[in-house]
């Protein structure tokens, strides 16, 4: 039994009061988000709420990052809105299940480690863009049912309640941390509105959240190749977007808590949660950075807070909808604005003068793409590709050659820097084929043959020397470089020699 609990990290120390109160706060914050994202996707509010319950519960129990919250998200809603409009909700459920299967496969193959390839400027840009999205999404609350901006006393009342919630969330932790500031802000604003009979927008004005237990439901779609062709691209994009957002959120929570989550375990949990969400009438989702930060800032560090949040959300749906629908939206708006302020990496401004220009460019580009297109996966993907290109360009310029002729009349080229697709052009320009002596040695003690472009470059330089009747030798190739050349023996044939005074470290071990 002990091993079973250790498997799910239930053995960690738990502050039950903090976890329960934090979970309750998160549950309240989940409601308007889930409803809003369901509307974005063109689905019923309960579809978003069921997804928030199922995603949150499964990932809290099985996930690789205790304290992280998952649910219905805007990133997923944007992906499925076209599918919902053209094919209907049943195809959405089927796509959600398939996306979950993709994520399980991803995690099972231990591919979560590739999130480490995301550079820090891209993470800064991702976080800042997400903070802007969270803030901008709250501005809709300052509009009436007709879509026009609030004005007059209605605006001042709503704004005053929002500022009151923000003031409590900012100031209460400076006085005491016995109770979560976020939950206190919601309760105080609720009490003020009820006590003074203030007429203001409530959760119920968005939509009714009353419902039952999520019904088990196999998607009513034809099990055919045609159906697979329809849902496959949506499922693949959903899986990618969900994993990128979830694993980046995991990294951010890791930094805040100074602990380390398990990315592959989280990927599998996200997949299982999406499969369950699709089978229990949910729109699917992923990790939610806003709610995760609410949870972490409230002091929660264990799985219990996420479980409480999910269960309480279901309780609200089934039994407490009439009460929760009276919660002022101003309280939740103030809470989410404070989350956006806390999410933004203000330190990124202080480091601008210290960062390389290309990193500053990456950070601002990813921020803009995230904030304008609301496509987190695309923003991160573009950031990673550009970072890789910048890296390749920097390394391409580092190829160097020190040249000398020894006492035997042999010309030596001592190479420095990696030889790969980006540096092959500069590599070819280092050699003076016509004026070199009869024998040439290219020394790779301080270089590496990295890819097929490098092999082809060696082939070309060898051919150039052979055409004028001169010999070329390669020296000090590392074992992995020689292995790469051996695999390409049909493409290139070069004379590899070893300096008797030099041995590669791995040869000494052998």
Image (cartoon, rainbow, N blue to C red):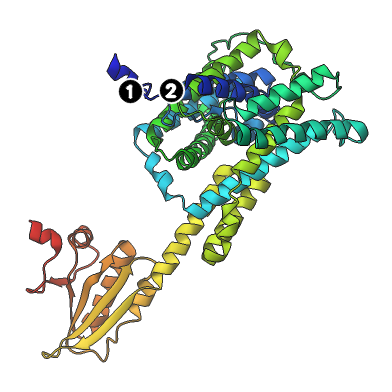
Residue furthest to the front = 175
Question: Is residue 245 placed above or below 144 in the rendered structure?
Answer: below
Q: Element under label 2?
A: loop
Q: Which mark is residue 7?
A: 1
Q: Is residue 412 visible?
A: yes
The crowding category of the residue bearing disc 1, from other C-alpha atoms within 10 Å (few below 14, some 14 to 19, many at least 20), is few
Q: Is residue 468 visible?
A: no
Question: Is residue 306 placed above or below 120 in the rendered structure?
Answer: above
Residue in the foreground of this view, choosing between 185 and 434: 185
Q: Quadrant of residue 333?
A: top right
Along the horizontal axis of the image, is 442 left or right of 28? Answer: left
* Among the two numbered marks 1 and 2 on one chain, the one whose residue lies closer to the N terminus: 1
Residue in the foreground of this view, choosing between 166 and 144: 166
Residue furthest to the right = 152
Q: Element under label 1?
A: helix
Along the horizontal axis of the image, is 331 left or right of 100? Answer: right
Q: Which residue is mark 2?
A: 14
């Amino acid at each position: 039994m002990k091993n079973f609990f250790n498997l799910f990290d239930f053995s960690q120390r738990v502050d039950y009061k903090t976890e329960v109160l934090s979970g309750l706060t998160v549950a309240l914050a989940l409601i308007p988000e889930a409803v809003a994202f369901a509307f974005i996707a063109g689905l019923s509010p309960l579809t978003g709420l069921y997804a928030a319950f199922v995603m949150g519960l499964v990932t809290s129990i099985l996930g690789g990052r205790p304290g992280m919250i998952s649910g219905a998200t805007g990133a997923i809603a944007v992906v499925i809105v076209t599918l919902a409009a053209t094919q209907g909700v049943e195809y959405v459920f089927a796509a959600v299940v398939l996306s979950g299967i993709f994520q399980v496969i991803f995690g099972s193959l231990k591919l979560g480690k590739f999130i480490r390839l995301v550079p820090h400027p891209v993470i800064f840009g991702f976080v800042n863009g997400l903070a802007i999205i969270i803030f901008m999404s709250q501005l809709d609350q300052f509009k009436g049912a007709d879509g026009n901006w609030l004005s007059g006393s209605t605006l001042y009342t709503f704004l005053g309640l929002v500022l009151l919630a923000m003031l409590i969330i900012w100031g209460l932790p400076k006085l005491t941390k016995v109770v979560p500031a976020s939950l206190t802000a919601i309760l105080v604003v609720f009490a003020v509105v009820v006590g003074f009979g203030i007429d203001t927008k409530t959760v119920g004005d968005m939509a009714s959240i009353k419902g039952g237990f999520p019904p088990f439901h196999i998607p009513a779609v034809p099990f055919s190749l045609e159906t697979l062709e329809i849902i496959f691209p949506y499922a693949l994009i959903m899986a990618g977007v969900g994993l990128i957002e979830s694993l980046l959120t995991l990294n951010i929570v890791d930094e805040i808590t100074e602990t380390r989550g398990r990315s592959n375990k989280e990927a599998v949990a996200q997949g299982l949660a999406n499969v369950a969400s699709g089978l229990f009438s949910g729109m699917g989702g992923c990790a939610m950075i806003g709610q995760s930060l609410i949870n972490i800032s409230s002091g929660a560090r264990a799985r219990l807070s996420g479980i409480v949040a999910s269960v309480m959300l279901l309780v609200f749906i089934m039994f407490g909808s009439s009460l929760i629908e009276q919660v002022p939206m101003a309280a939740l708006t103030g809470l989410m604005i404070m989350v956006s302020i806390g999410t933004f990496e203000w330190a990124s401004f202080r480091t601008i003068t210290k960062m390389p220009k290309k990193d500053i460019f990456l950070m601002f580009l990813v921020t803009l793409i995230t904030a304008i297109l609301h496509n987190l996966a695309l923003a991160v993907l573009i950031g990673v590709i550009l970072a890789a290109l910048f890296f390749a360009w920097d390394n391409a310029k580092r190829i160097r050659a020190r040249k000398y002729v020894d006492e035997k009349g042999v010309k030596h080229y001592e190479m420095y820097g990696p030889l790969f697709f980006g540096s092959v052009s500069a590599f070819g320009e280092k050699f003076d084929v016509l004026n070199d002596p009869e024998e040439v040695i290219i020394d790779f003690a301080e270089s590496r043959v990295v890819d097929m472009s490098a092999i082809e470059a060696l082939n070309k330089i060898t051919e150039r020397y052979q055409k004028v009747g001169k010999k070329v030798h390669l020296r000090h190739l590392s074992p992995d470089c020689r292995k790469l050349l051996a695999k390409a023996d049909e493409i290139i044939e070069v004379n590899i020699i070893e300096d008797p005074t030099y041995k590669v470290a791995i040869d000494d071990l052998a």
